[in-house]
Image: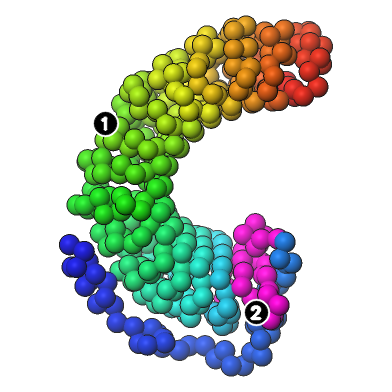
Amino acid sequence: MFASLLLLVLSFHFVEGSAFEPTLNCSQYSDDRHVLNSLPFKVTILDNSSSCQQNPACARLNAQNQVYDLALDLVPTALQVYCLTHLQSLYIFGYITSGYTWPIPYEIGKLTNLTYLSLSYVDGKDIPETIGELKLLRTLYLLAIRITYITGALAALPSLTDLTLHAPLAELPSFLSILPLNHLGILNGQFTTIPEDFFRNLNPTLSSLTIDISHLVNLGPFADLTNLTTLGITGDGMSVLPWQFTYMTNLKDLRFQGLNCLSAFPRNFTRGVTYLDLSKNCFTQLPAPLLLSETLANIDMSYNQLTDLSTLALSRSPLSVVFLPFNQIQYIPPEIINLSESLSYLALYGNQLTTLPAEQIVKMKKLTGLDVQFNNINDTEKARLKSIFAANPNLTVYF
């Protein structure tokens, strides 16, 4: 199968040095600063202590005045951006407006020094084959609204280890499984099946997976992901944890996103998990396997149906951060102090609490944050609680 897949991707013919007809005259620019100054919008030049990833329309230059990091908050209407051939990181944030589309230009293939490429809100219908010229690319993030097909040229990227495709893909391309991926994100996909041996081929290198399973009719291939350490699942309507997930014995980080109704967990499934997101489910109490875990440190069970924390107080897990907002919790037992050696932050906003066991909570050694906003604690009780909590200057309580 590998041989046939490789033959498929090698069928994309690229002319040596250029995979497309030249459309740019980059010789008219004396240097990269000249290119930036020619753009029809202002680009701020940052020093090397800042990152363009969090700053729209900015660039960073090296000592030779070469742009190596560039972020644009508007789709570039001037193709001279692709004359910046020293770029190592490129972020483009597009915007969808009526009657306007932003296809990825063929000129993207000129940026052969790129190692990081992030393209958001692409409104074209395909990815140009010239992306196969980016042999040094390690990370590719694509958020597109109409791309349903992925060019096989992606399989010609030998350095690609981190790939996220947020697009309505009609099928999951088999050739992606020959890439040396450490992380794969597939979101908003419309495909119903996973190609045969897809996860088995990826298993030796894949450690992190984020995937939308909303349309999948068979989850069997997930049983091949025995080396996975991070799993993010997006989907609606789950009432039982898929049995295939129990084969993922190396999981450390497990997150469920969507509107589901899980209410129980298999024994020993979370044996090595340190972070668990079970928000927006149907749990009425904390699952026993979680309370017995020797590794679980962070848990999010917001938007469930929890009513009290009696079981939490009996936990043997080294819980450090616990998020329980928007449940129906009415009572916190004094035994919460049993978590004194590990608990540092407890979020309980949006519940039905009328009071707190402040005399015990104030003694908790490592607790530095407690959020009880939007509960039913009246002003008189808040004043009483605040006077007690004042004895612990390291603890911040949000009322």
Q: CA distance from mark 1 to mark 2?
A: 52 Å
**Residue drawn at x 35%, y 24% as measured from the top left:** 268
- Determine whether the residue tagged by mark 1 lies in a helix, strand or loop: helix
- Give the residue displayed 39% in from the left and 48% down from the top: 207
Mark 1 residue type: Trp
Residue bounds of the magenta highlight: 50-77
The quarter of the picture where the C terminus appears is: top right
For the question of whether residue 167 can be seen, the reply is no
What colouring does the structure picture have? rainbow
Residue 75 falls within the magenta-colored stretch: yes
Whole-percent x and y of residue 92?
Answer: 56, 65
User: Where residue 1 appears, x then y in whole percent?
Assistant: 17, 62
Q: Residues within 10 Å of mark 2 (few under 14, many from 20)?
A: some
- Residue under numbered circle 1: 243
**Where 311 falls versus 44 (above or below)?**
above
Name the element at disc 2: loop
Residue visible at 52% across and 88% down? 24
Residue 97 vertical placement versus 133 (above, below):
above
Q: Is residue 26 magenta?
A: no
Residue, disc 2: 66
